[in-house]
Image (spheres, grey):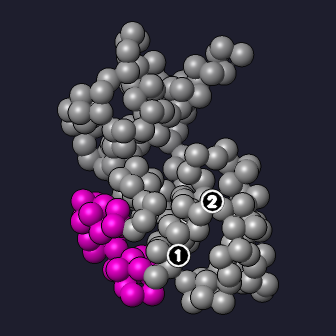
Amino acid sequence: MRRLIKAAGPCSIEPRKTSPYQALVRAVAHQQLNGTAAETILGRFTALVPGKRFPQPEHLCEISDEAIRACGFSRAKLAAIRDIAARTESGHVPPLRSLAKLTDEAIIERLVECRGVGRWTVEMFLMFTLARPDVLPADDFGVRNGYRLAYGLPEMPKPKELLALGERWKPYRTTASWYLWRAVDLDRAKAK
């Protein structure tokens, strides 16, 4: 890790100041798409409610399924967005202030109940919205591949193995994850 930290430079995780609802909708939009395509779809989605920075849950009842699908969302993603909005309005997806009082595992248990939201999505939310310092997304391909590259291994560790190996980075596993992603970036840059 020491060599990787030296090569990558200081960790620069910048938490996004956004509501849980918006963070989850954005995460759903990004699933299985490259960043440019997802941002284009989100731009169209935002334009559905002129004068607003992002359509809020209460706006969705006024927007037809066809209009949301025309932004580029699949039927499954439309259903996920509607579920996230409904759960936000009901309080099941609480505001940031309430989430800040919960443990990481309690947040994961609560938010994975939303349609289209899995553990990985909530881990990214914990890291990049709530700025939680001790998250290791062991199922993340990039983190596992980064570990393989950083430690010169022939194969990536399995998620359970990575969780065990990551115990030594507590309570800073978010930072360790960031560096493991940088190992992949540095390897790609070297290959070019």
Q: Is residue 145 above or below residue 100?
A: above
* Location of the C terminus (image quadrant): top right
Q: Is residue 151 left or right of residue 73?
A: left
Residue 166's disc is none
Instruction: Report x, y in % for residue 41.
Output: 72, 61
Q: Is residue 32 left or right of residue 99?
A: right
Residue at 66% in and 21% down: 189
Compare residues 55 and 125 and report the one nearer the observer. 55
- Neighbour tally class for label 2: few under 14, some 14-19, many 20 plus, Cα within 10 Å: few
Marks 2 and 1: CB-CB under 8 Å?
no
> Quarter-wise, where is residue 77 in the image?
bottom right
Instruction: Report x, y in % for residue 181.
Output: 50, 34
Is residue 112 highlighted in magenta?
yes
Q: Secondary structure at mark 1?
A: helix
Residue at 68% in and 81% down: 64
To which residue does mark 2 refer? 74
Residue at 54% in and 61% down: 76
Q: Is residue 100 above or below residue 131?
A: below
Q: Is residue 17 above or below residue 186?
A: below
Compare residues 7 and 116 and report the one nearer the observer. 116
Q: Secondary structure at mark 2?
A: loop
Question: In this view of the protein, can residue 113 be seen by the observer?
Answer: yes
To which residue does mark 1 refer? 82
Say which amino acid is labelled 1.
Arg
| Nearest to N terminus: mark 2 or mark 1 | 2
Say which amino acid is labelled 2.
Ser
Residue at 59% in and 24% down: 186
Q: Is residue 29 left or right of residue 166?
A: right
Which residues fall within the magenta stretch? 87-113
Q: Is residue 46 above or below residue 117?
A: below
